[in-house]
Image (cartoon, rainbow, N blue to C red):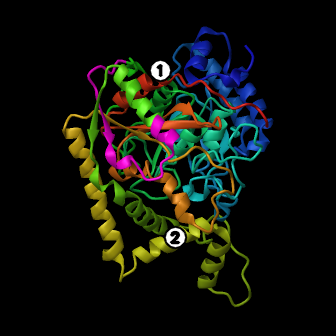
Amino acid sequence: MSDLNKLGLAEARDALRKGDVTSVELTESCLKAIDDADALNAFVHKTPEIALERAKAADERIKGGDAPAMCGLPIGIKDLFCTKGVPSQAASKILEGFKPEYESTVSQQLADAGAVMLGKLNMDEFAMGSSNETSVYGNAVSPWRRGNDDAQLTPGGSSGGSASAVAADLCLAATGTDTGGSIRQPAAFTGITGIKPTYGRCSRWGIVAFASSLDQAGPMTKNVRDAAIMLEAMCGHDPKDSTSTELAVPNFEAMLTGDIKGKKIGIPKEYRMDGMPAEIEKLWSEGAEMLKAAGAEIVDISLPHTKYALPAYYVIAPAEASSNLARYDGVRYGRRAQLSQGDGITEMYEKTRAEGFGHEVQRRVMVGTYVLSAGFYDAYYNRARRVRTLIKKDFEDVFAAGVDAILTPATPSASFGLGEMTEADPVQMYLNDVFTVTVNLAGLPGVSVPAGLDKQGLPLGLQLIGRPWEEGDLLNTAYALENAAGFVAKPGKWW
């Protein structure tokens, strides 16, 4: 079999079980694709020795007949996950040289399931960004192009390296994290599937924290079936994470019947934004028609506090970030600035953070420190927390009324060019998260499914939001949408 790196997880798993291919062959195919794709800057720490060692072990395990679904499948790991003995920098200069002595729970679970780690993937620094332009490694680049235009496009953020690698077939799937849309937005921009599970479904232990009440890991894959397979391996209770839930993890793949007859799908009127591109509006309507044709009932719903979601998110997330990032001070690990004679500990902190953190991280730390300060705590942070409760209640009311899932656009536009959204107005960049942040604020599961192309030939995604803990049901609805949309476009190889 040629082009083994182009397989999805399910196809590769079935081929491995039949003996048509070995994990070593799969892994070597991906490693070659990675070496040929430096122009995408997706993989930032390559681990070919670890990959081949795990692939050989997986082949032995498959021969033994007791291999889990993920066994032998080559994947990429976002640089936010701590991986033992492998650089884990969160794409920041301040963590230069940091090689953890431990493994994050999610990457450990994937390793235990026999998955093969190919290396670490590019991302926005500390997961703060929507375009993968804040990374110490430089920009990740989308494998997609606009028509005959050579302009480099963003793969989205913060999981931009993961999205680019999966879309370009450098790996079969990848891990991502989602604090305000960082799995779903890049998935939509690159024509792949990405699911953020319910908050507490995946352990956060060993994942570098951005905003602890919002962060959640999830898979980024080539289709919905692959997302179901990988999500099952990533989930489960972890006593090391106090927010991890003790719930049995179902067989998500077995729940993919494609039958959604009688399901109620809500269309929130508040998501019809001023200035929304006609193509996004059209795709949304077509998505609703597809689900209706599959037997679902489409109902109009209201989520009245949606308009406060972005401002609330951009108070809560920086507040938590300013607290979480206080640990990076140059004392015990990571980078320490060169000090002048007479410098004390305060100067060390100041110099280390000034040169270690990028502009976007510094901006969010400053905003977070400001909203938590004595005079503004009630005016900003407490008010944002109250708004968050109202947003959560909006969803609870809709689900209590019998709605099974909510259909929205995933992003307000297709992918844009690197450098097109300047630092001069960061709010423009923040608006990219307009359809995704509500899901994190309410702790709900959300999935992005590629559903069409815009007039320039770039992918557009639709988002489905589900009831808490019902990822299986949500993935089944996504599966029905995927089947109806029939999206099969791939980027033309230019790299």
Q: Position of residue 75 (x, y in %)?
A: 62, 33
The residue located at (19%, 38%) in the rendering is 401
> Mark 2 and mark 1: span between their CA atoms?
43 Å
Name the residue carrying label 2.
365
Above or below 116: residue 304: below
Is residue 206 rendered to the left or right of residue 475? right
Magenta stretch? Answer: 259-282
Disc 1 residue type (three-letter): Asn
Disc 2 residue type (three-letter): Val
Above or below 446: residue 306: below
Which element type, helix, strand or loop, lies under badge 2? Answer: helix
Which element type, helix, strand or loop, lies under badge 1? Answer: helix
Which is in the foreground here, disc 2 or disc 1? Answer: 1
Q: Position of residue 399 (x, y in %)?
A: 24, 39
Residue closer to the observer: 233 or 12: 12
Above or below 439: residue 169: above
Earlier-in-chain disc, 2 versus 1:
2
